[in-house]
Image (cartoon, helix red, strand yellow):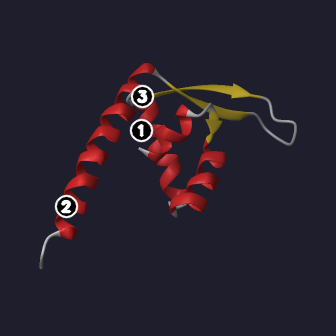
Amino acid sequence: MCVLKQLSRGDSYAYEIAQILMAEVGMAEGTIYPLMRRMAEEGMVSTYMIQSDSGPSRKYFRLTEQGRDTLARQLAEWASFETCVRRFLRADQ
């Protein structure tokens, strides 16, 4: 969900996404690359190459319509889960 949300803000390459998610949510860099590959295989993202000024070409990822739909569904599920947890934590113990 976090990767899809980041891509909803704009196209990006895996290392950049990894750096953002490591800083924001503590997601390990090694988690990102297999996840990006799987999301591409499942059609949630598409890829394209851009020549880098500082080295080899970079593979950029773009959210597809299926990815947008998946993100919307995951955000709704997260909101429901969060509501349930908050309700549980407020209950008398």
Q: Quick one: label 2 or label 3, which is nearer the N terminus?
A: 3
**Residue 19 seen in the figure:** yes
Mark 3 falls on what kind of element?
helix
The residue where tag 2 is placed is 87
The N terminus: image quadrant: top left
Q: Quick one: label 1 or label 2, which is nearer the N terminus?
A: 1
Residue 34 drawn at (x, y percent): 47, 47
**Residue 43 seen in the figure:** no
**Is disc 2 in contact with disc 3, using a CB cutoff of under 8 Å?**
no
Q: Which mark is residue 67?
A: 3
The C terminus: image quadrant: bottom left
31 vs 78: above or below: below
Residue type pointed to by label 2 = Arg
Q: Which mark is residue 38?
A: 1
Which residue is found at the position 51% from the left and 50% from the top?
A: 32
Which residue is found at the position 49% from the left and 43% from the top?
A: 3
Which residue is found at the position 87% from the left and 36% from the top?
A: 53
Question: 33 or 21, which lies in front?
Answer: 21
Outermost residue toward the right in this view: 53
Residue type pointed to by label 3 = Gly
